[in-house]
Image (cartoon, rainbow, N blue to C red):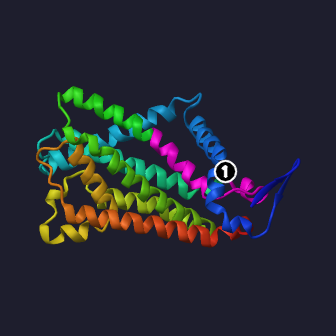
Amino acid sequence: MAQKDNNFLIIESGKAEKHYFKDLWRYRELFYFLSWRDILVRYKQTVIGIAWSVLRPVITMVIFTIVFGRIAKLPSVDAPYPILVFTALLPWLFFSSALSDSSNSLIGNANMISKIYFPRMILPASAVIVALIDFFISFILLGIIMLWYRFVPSWKIVFMPLFLLLALIVSLGAGFLLSALNVKYRDFKYIVPFIIQFGLYASPVGFSSDVIPNKWRFLYSINPMVGVIDGFRWSIIGKGVEFYIPGFLISIFLAILLFLIGIIYFRKTEKTFADRI
């Protein structure tokens, strides 16, 4: 752990392990700096950064509406199909952006890791914060779409922060795990995009979970993002959206389990990052 002695900063061997989570609080200013730096890099003096935050969900919404709503003619509960899709895109795009950025955060900051001491967990965590900015931009866009369709959200929208918290837990857990694996096995930088692409179609983004047969519903909920997406739809659309409680409970359990596994594996391999990177 780093200790101040007059004008010197002393790193005492072994004590960093004992006071690691206290150091996370002590280095909070670094966390703020890294988060703000990544936000500026993405949005400052650029048009495509902001435009992409708008175009990406809109284009995906249009494609899914045409494929699942117009061609496949899947049910849209009691909401226009674009709103059904967009309420699922909110948590999914947050998760996919957070996972993509956090999994590469250690490799992208190799110079910092090899030169100075700080809790490495700050890096993937700060990457997730940047994804939250995109989430809020998309949420404003959802409000505009609702105005266009004259759709009034359910009063249950007050519960949406709880489902956002669950999405945050899933994103952090997966980010910690994959960022550590990416240092040890560089092939993971090719695997992560595949996981995101596969997860998009394996999750109920373009359709409602109601189309899944009841006998498979619980097994389908093993994907923790299923409970998150269903929760967002239930809180925003409300009427006509079934809230599958067993699936939501398993999503909570798996999200917390993934979060703990991510932290444990990250801490176990963290001491080797500077050598491997």
- Which quadrant of the rendered structure holds the N terminus? bottom right
Q: Position of residue 82 (x, y in %)?
A: 22, 39
Quadrant housing residue 142? top left
Quadrant housing residue 267? bottom right
Q: Position of residue 49 (x, y in %)?
A: 51, 35
Q: Which residue is mark 1?
A: 26
Q: Residues within 10 Å of mark 1 (few under 14, many from 20)?
A: some
168 falls in the magenta region: no
Report the residue at 26% width, 52% height from top.
Answer: 231
Q: Nearer the viewer, residue 92 or 251?
A: 251
- Which quadrant of the rendered structure holds the C terminus? bottom right
User: Relative to 162, is 59 above or below?
Assistant: above
Quadrant housing residue 32? top right
User: Relative to 244, is 151 above or below?
Assistant: above
124 falls in the magenta region: yes
| Left or right: 199 in relation to 52 | left
Report the residue at 29% width, 31% height from top.
Answer: 143
Q: Is residue 205 visible?
A: no
| Left or right: 88 in relation to 2 | left
- The majority secondary structure of the magenta stretch comes to helix
Q: Position of residue 234 (x, y in %)?
A: 21, 48
Q: Position of residue 194 (x, y in %)?
A: 43, 62
The segment highlighted magenta reads 109-133
